[in-house]
Image: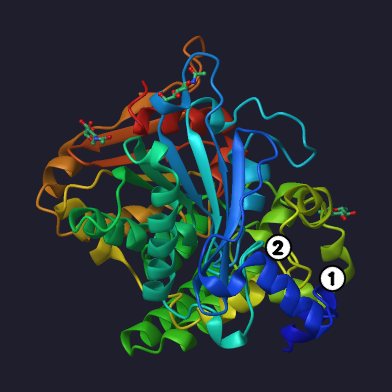
Amino acid sequence: MHPEVFIMELAPRSCPVPLLLLLLLLLGLSTGAVISQPKEKSNEVWGYLTVRKDAHMFWWLYYAASSYKNFTELPLIMWLQGGPGGSSTGFGNFEEIGPLDRNLQPRKTTWLQSASLLFVDNPVGAGFSYVDKADAYAKDLATVTSDMMFLLKVFFDDHKEFQNIPFYIFSESYGGKMAAGIALELQKAIQQRAIQCNFAGVALGDAWISPINSVLSWGPFLYSVSLLDDQGLAEVSQAAEEVLDALNKGLYQKATRLWEKTEMVIQQNTDEVNFYNILTKNSSMSAVASRLGFTQIHLVHLFQRHVRRLQQDPLSQLMNGPIRKKLRIIPDVCTWGGQASFVFLNMEGDFMKPVVSIVDELLEAGVNVTVYNGQLDLIVDTMGQESWMRELKWKELPKFNQLKWKPLHSDPKSSETSAFVKSYKNLAFYWILRAGHMVPSDQPETALKMMRLVTQQE
Ligand SMILES: *[C@@H]1O[C@H](CO)[C@@H](O)[C@H](O)[C@H]1NC(C)=O
Ligand SMILES: *[C@@H]1O[C@H](CO)[C@@H](O)[C@H](O)[C@H]1NC(C)=O
Ligand SMILES: *[C@@H]1O[C@H](CO)[C@@H](O)[C@H](O)[C@H]1NC(C)=O
């Protein structure tokens, strides 16, 4: 496979070198400082930060817009997208929780009504973030985390108004794995007084915390909901065992490839179930998700099969069209999503590594941890999440396990159950009903309510 061919088509580097250099100088790319943050309206700012040599990270901040409260009375939430390579400023913002939807219409359920929102395209190469040289992509979680520490340090230094406001990290999918690593380092940095921030908790949504637990539960989950027969279950289980075997031998890249193979065995046996929501096949959402949501290996295949179609993707058109124009600072060399598949490919050796021990460290350190998962998600199914949670060494876990969950109703007037929740000390788990992988897209009201509960607003 030759993904670079397609990337080149999507992001032609036609900018003549002197002009490019001039542009880089003008934008201050080589200085390691904040490049620029022009204000369109007073309630949103954005900019680039050079977090490492040749590595430029794009962020976009919206100040909370509540009719009842000043932003200073509301929390700040950083949203991290999955992939690795998915775009927080694009997908999270316009498809999930931001003030406007993909058609630039106001979103009734935007999280902005209850929080300020910080979207960051990370790792570098995702969304409008970009690298100048191929060796600048992150290859492991440690680099992803230290890049983000650099960004957060500069962010809180430059936005002192947020230093005392409760700061939460919410995340989705692979973003959850990054969020766990980032939360732990942030906690340490605050203790060492390296970063001034009122860190209040991390929420891991359909999070890629222990990949093998997901893979091993795919077969039983699909079988239990009539999406596999006996023969199919045997084939999927066999493929999953091969992933486990590779992991046990420490062959992480091989495990990533076998993981992809297991997905194909599932596709063949389920008439192509949608990995992001087992009940919605062939919706426009699932098409967008499979391109920009979780796996960039899918993306690479899609690049190869449907380059034309990808360029017509409505989100991609929005980001590379009107949004790019509005932001004004996106350099010519950068196409939104143009480097996404390289972000994934560079993280291939990290992809299947679990971070359960990091969650344990967070719990031990007293950080508030929320785990939430969509009932209809397959790629990160709830059974898999429950199974890694049983592996936690946290000493309060037995008490957490003994509790009964409680039903949650988003609409107090309705008897419809939106979710179940269990919470003990600094761990909470939300079982989100009728949602797949992208919880705020599938169940926006429930997601908003959960966010308000997690941030102590209800
Ligand atoms: C919000 O709070 C800040 C800081 O206390 C203050 O400067 C600003 O005037 C307030 N804005 C409104 C609309 O009350
Ligand atoms: C952390 O969670 C506990 C238990 O739910 C809660 O009492 C506490 O206020 C939370 N802390 C923050 C900063 O949200
Ligand atoms: C969904 O299926 C219909 C009919 O098979 C097809 O025409 C359409 O292109 C599909 N849509 C997506 C988003 O794949």
The residue at which mark 2 appears reads as 291
Task: Please count the marks in the image.
Answer: 2
Q: How many C-alpha atoms fall within 10 Å of the one at disc 1: few (<14), some, or many (≥20)?
A: few
The image position of residue 69, as x and y in percent, is: 46, 18
Identify the secondary structure beneath mark 2.
helix
Please state, as top left, top right, bottom left or bottom right, where the N terminus lies in the image.
bottom right
Q: How many C-alpha atoms fall within 10 Å of the one at disc 2: few (<14), some, or many (≥20)?
A: many
Q: Residue at x 42, y 78 (%)?
A: 140
Please state, as top left, top right, bottom left or bottom right, where the C terminus lies in the image.
top left
| 56 over 417 or under it: above or below | below
Q: Residue at x 50, y 78 (%)?
A: 347
For residue 306, the mark is: 1
- Residue type beneath disc 1: His
Q: Is residue 3 left or right of residue 261?
A: right
Q: Which of the two residues, 142 or 298, is positioned nearer the viewer here?
A: 142
Q: Is residue 17 left or right of residue 226?
A: right
Identify the mark nearer the N-term, 2 or 1.
2
Q: Which of the two residues, 224 or 59, is positioned nearer the viewer here?
A: 59
Q: Is mark 1 within 8 Å of ligand 3?
A: no
Label 2 vs label 1: CA separation? 11 Å
